[in-house]
Each structure stands twice: as C-alpha cells, then as structure tokens.
Amino acid sequence: MLGQTGSNYAGIHGIYANPASAVDSRYKVHVHLAGYENYLYNNYLAWEAPYSPVAMLTNTVSSKYRGPSKGIIFRDQEYLREKLNGRDKHLRAGGEVRGPGVLITLNEKNAFSFNTRIRAGVAVTHASQSVAQLIKNGTTIGRAIEPEDFGTHVYANTNGMVELSGSYARVMYDEDEDFVKVGVTVKRVIGLHQGHILGRNIDYEYVQDPTYATEAAVRLKSVDAQYGITNEGALQSVSFSPVWLLGNAPAGSGWGADLGMVYEYRPDVRKYSYRDRYGVHRDASKNKYLYRISVSLLDIGRILYKNPNYVEAYKLQRRDAILAEDNFTGMQGIDGFMLGLNQTLNPSESERIASYRTALPTRLQASIDYNVKEKIYVNAMLMQGFVSNKRAAFTMPSVLAVTPRYEGKWVEVAMPVALTDNYSRLALGLGARLGILYFGSDNLLSTLNIGNPKGIEFYFGAQIPIYQKAPESNLKCYPQREKRGLFGFLKKK
C-alpha cells in the first residue's frame, strides 16, 4: 500500500511499516474497520485476453466473452503468452485482509495499537524455463520441452497465516529541532496453510505414458527434493478460540516482532509550540518536520509446523520416477495434490519430516519523507527482503519507490513510482484517502489491462479517524536559532 504507508495519516498502515509511527500521530484514535490488498507479478506469462485480470477476478467480464452457460471463456494458449528467453522464471502473488485494529495516543510521549490481519503468499522462484513450461503445458507429446543441459530446478512456497499484534511506541528525544521516536510490535502468528516444493538437480526425459497410448509422461531420471504441505483439515480446524490462538491446535504457530525508529528534523518547531501551566507542548494536530527518516526491521520470527494431524513433509532423492498427468487427474484441492505427488515419488516413512520451520518475510524498511511545501510531500522508500525462497519460507518481493503526495486532513492523493518485483519491473500507482475510505493500486496500468500486463495490484478499505485537536490557546512563537539537523544539505532555504 505505497499510496498509504508513507502518510502522516497512515495510522495502522504506518505501524505495519514502522511501529514507531504510532506515537506523535495526527490521530487521537484511529479505528481500522476492514481492508483488502492483493498483488501478482511474474516474468513468464503476459496477459493478452480481451478483458482485464480484475474483470475476471471480480466476475465482471462482458457477456461477449461468456459461453452458453454464462461461464467466462478463457483460452489458455491464446490469452497467456510465454516469454521464452532461457532465463529462470518466477511468480510472486499475495494478499492481506486487514481486520479490526485500533491506534490510541495516550499522551505526547506514548501510544499503543492492537491489530489483526490474515496474510497469504505464493512464490515460485528460480524455476528453470523448461520446468515452467512443463508446469504450464503439461506432458503432451506435441509440446515436449526438453530440460536444459545445465540442470533444472524449481523452488515454490505457499503460505497463509493469521496475525494478532500489539505495538507500543514512545518519544525518546524532543529537543529543539531534533526529534526521535522508537517502537516495537510483538505478534502472535498462526499458520493456516503452508506448502513447499524445493526441487534441485532435476533431470528428466519424455517417455510413453504407461496408461494412455497417445499421451506422454515424464521420467524423472534424477531429482533431489523436499516437499511438504498442511492438509485441508488445518483450514477446517480454524476456530479463533483462545486455545486455538495460543496453543498447539493449529498446524503451525510462532511469534514475531517488528522494531522501528524515526528521526525528524524540525527547523520551525517553535511555530508549533505552546506553553501552559504544565510546561511547553507541541501542537499534535500538525506535522512539524522538514524531513523524516524512518528505519525498521519487520517480521522477525518463525512459524513451527509440527501438528501431526495436519503436517506431511518429506525429504528424498529419486531416480526413474514417472511423472504422469494421470497421477493428478481428478485430484481435488490440497489433499489431492499431495496424493498426486506421493503417487509419483512414493516416499517412505523413513523419509518423512516430522516438523519444519518457516521464516516470516523478514525485511528492512528505510524511507525519507521530505516536506516540499505545505501539504506537499515526497517519500522515498526501500523494502529489502532477507529471506531466501530456496527453503520453506514466507517471502515478499523487494521494492524501491518514490511517492509524491498531497496530504490533507480529510483528502489525500499519492502517486507512487516503484521498482517492484525485486526491483525488476517499473510500476506507476495511484492511491487516495477520502474521509473514512482508502483505495488505490501500486501497479495501476497493469491492473487496468494496459500494455499486456504481467501482474496486478489493488487495495481498498474503511476506517474511522478521530483526529488530534489543535491547542485552544494561541501558539506562542519563540526566536529561531540556526541548526542544520542530521542532514544539513536538506535544510530549508
């Protein structure tokens, strides 16, 4: 949510990027009701359908492209163009449902927040082009794709989790032009679903399907693999009771944390200062900085998947295994996919993994926000992930973005320009906040089906803002003294 995160009115969205942003907020209370975001990026398939991906997702495709039963017509080979350049392929997709949350400013120096969300992510990375084609096109003889001479591989992860978090932030230093605040978030994370396939040293060839004379199969001449999945019972057991949230009933659970610090350089802070019988205070309803520097480390932690009722995983090596489409024909859902894998690789009990850990999507957030003039800001943000997808893990793509914005109390518009998908793709976005509503897209052109997109991204939600009030007494002005802050070259003229 680049169109929301950098704002001084971001509220809980800012806390997800840096817990220190909770204190000295423009909100006395910020109540988040509900929100949704999703994203998808890939470097393999370009969308060439006559309707947009969003229209398909929302079932708003024109009747012109529907069949007699009103189902959407989708021609796989025609509407998805493959980019074949010999390089590894990847796909990253994810989403969040941000549930109820509240930010409460206790006083000038302290604030806390409680938030809830459900997060999901899919990452297929470092997939050899031949493996990507095999996954898309199947084992049909006419589309036989031979493996690369230098070896093939694929790493894939799917993750879903519930997150309950509590944040605390405090002002640590407020002296003249310099201002520092810090924050911490502690989160309980419950694994709803996890699946992974880590395939290395894959060598295969096409052979006659043993069941169907006109079809082909793939003989895995060699493969080193680890794969695992939580079954459908893990999702069916969700209850949100205290026992389920805090105990060992889910498929997996764990703890995580966010750490953050914010520095603000405030050359005109005395314009926003006033005195009463208790001392000197700042006008909490106003932004006071020329520039703001934010640094945080997010999603430190792991989830342990160990419930034997829901977790099934194996680590093995195989030679001469037959991968036939018939193994997966008619298989339904998560359990069916796992059954198809087991029929193909025939794992033994000695190759079973009783439990495994997945890393949370640990990443560094660093940003600088510059006040160009009243209500006009420019934000530069880096989100760098640290977790490798070559193991069982939850990963998110790294992003570098510059976001100019107009920021008002009730109306805000932002236009992020970002290098998304691990800095591999340029995207233009648009985000807005109108009273209690917020919405936008960090990848607007692709979402609107402009230019044969390879991804989409959009978000929306609702919230209740209760703003800080300006002081009742007139603000007292004090003489200014020269000081340049941490970064003197940014001093306002």
Image (cartoon, rainbow, N blue to C red):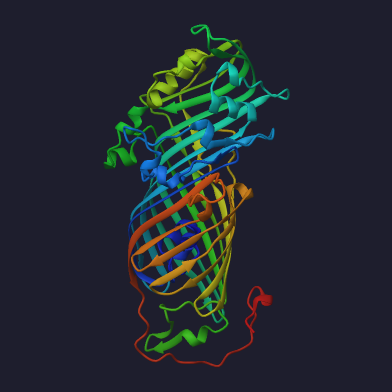
Residue 286 sits in which quadrant? bottom left
Give residue 445's position: percent from left, percent from top.
53, 54
Above or below residue 211? Residue 110 is below
Occupied quadrant, residue 71: top left
Seen in the picture, residue 440 relative to 66 is either above or below; the reply is: below
Query: Image point 44% across, 70% down: which residue?
Result: 412
Is residue 84 visible in this depiction of the protein? yes
* Residue 392 visible, this orientation: no
Name the side, left or right, on which 202 lies relative to 189.
right
Total numbered labels: 0
Residue 480, image x, y percentages: 58, 90
**Residue beneath the point at 57% across and 22% down:** 225
The residue that appears at 40% across and 41% down in the rendered structure is 161
Q: Residue at x 50, y 78 (%)?
A: 288
Observer-nearest of 249 and 233:
233
Which quadrant of the figure contains the C terminus? Answer: bottom right
Left or right, residue 474 beside residue 5: left
**Residue 163 at x, y percent in the picture:** 39, 46
The part of the image, by quadrant, that contains residue 247 is top left
Q: Which residue is situated farthest in the right direction here?
A: 149
Residue 211 horizontal/vertical position (percent): 49, 7
Q: Is residue 312 above or below residue 435?
A: above
| Residue in front for this viewpoint, 186 or 127 | 127
Of 86 and 204, the residue lying toward us = 86
